[in-house]
Image (cartoon, helix red, strand yellow):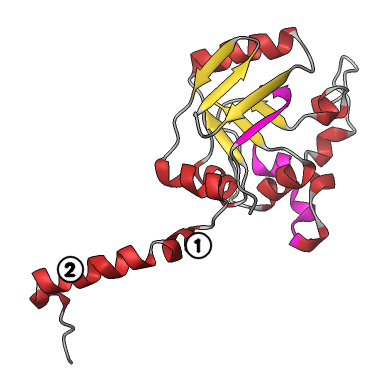
Amino acid sequence: MTPFDRHTGIAAPLLRANVNTDLITPARFLCRSRADGFADTLFADLQNSKAEDGTRFILSTPPFDRASILVAGENFGCGSSREHAVWALVDYGIKVVIASSFADIFYNNAIQNGLLPVRLSERDMHRLAMVIEARPGMTLTADLGQQLITCEGLKLIFEIDPYRKEQLLRGLSEIDLTLDALDRIQAFEARRSAEVPWLMKSKQP
């Protein structure tokens, strides 16, 4: 996957809670192969719909149709474990999703595909939402190295597991990271074998 360090883009507010994976990518698209792409499946049931007041879905409305950052509600990506939901976001051009909480499987799938999921506190989410809703189309910067979200003078720090951070910064899969540490793993095994050889001996049947 492509390494992620820093990204600046238009932020689209989708602040509803419990946006599930079936809403992100409807089940009827799950038989499609990864090679065919999933950009057109993203929020497919919402993209061409209108609310009761006549407004269109946020990503179908300029300037948010050019958004690469999604500011979402709590428990984003809940529901089934389908990785297709992340593929749809990535293929559409979304680089960052910011929310107060994510479904665990969605969060892990996002990182495995180079999509940065940012968790912010409810207070910081409220501050961020006020800023981006006041100025539609404004840009936001997500800096993974600094673990910082910035826009219009607002600076919000986010936490991320160091292992996940390295994975995104270097654009490596979990297998790649394990292979990268192979020398250290082998050195540990050799040291462990010398220190406690009785634990390292395999038992013969």
Q: Secondary structure at mark 2?
A: helix
Q: Which residue is mark 2?
A: 191
Q: Position of residue 25 (x, y in %)?
A: 74, 46
Q: Which residue is mark 1?
A: 176
Residue farthest to the bottom, as pictured: 205
Residue type (three-letter) at the residue carrying disc 2 = Arg
Q: Quadrant of residue 63?
A: top right
Q: Position of residue 130 (x, y in %)?
A: 65, 9
Residue type (three-letter) at the residue carrying disc 1 = Asp
Q: Judge by depth and name the residue closer to the eye, 176 or 16.
A: 176
Residue 19, can we see it?
Answer: no
What residue is at 64 percent from the left and 25 percent from the top? 141
Q: Could you tell which of marks 1 and 2 lies nearer the N-terminus?
A: 1
Q: The C terminus lies in which quarter of the figure?
A: bottom left
Other residues around mark 1 within 10 Å, as few (<14) / some (14–19) / many (≥20): few
What residue is at 49 percent from the left and 29 percent from the top? 147
Q: Secondary structure at mark 1?
A: helix
Residue 109, can we see it?
Answer: yes
Is 132 left or right of 65, judged from the image as shown?
A: left
Range of the magenta residues? 6-34
Q: Is residue 136 above or below residue 179?
A: above
Gap in angstroms between the C-alphas marked 1 and 2: 23 Å
What residue is at 70 percent from the left and 14 percent from the top? 132
Q: Position of residue 127 (x, y in %)?
A: 58, 10
Is 179 left or right of 72, judged from the image as shown?
A: left
Is 165 a magenta residue?
A: no
Is 156 left or right of 46, judged from the image as shown?
A: left
Q: Position of residue 175 (x, y in %)?
A: 48, 63
- Residue 47: which disc? none
Is 59 left or right of 154, judged from the image as shown?
A: right
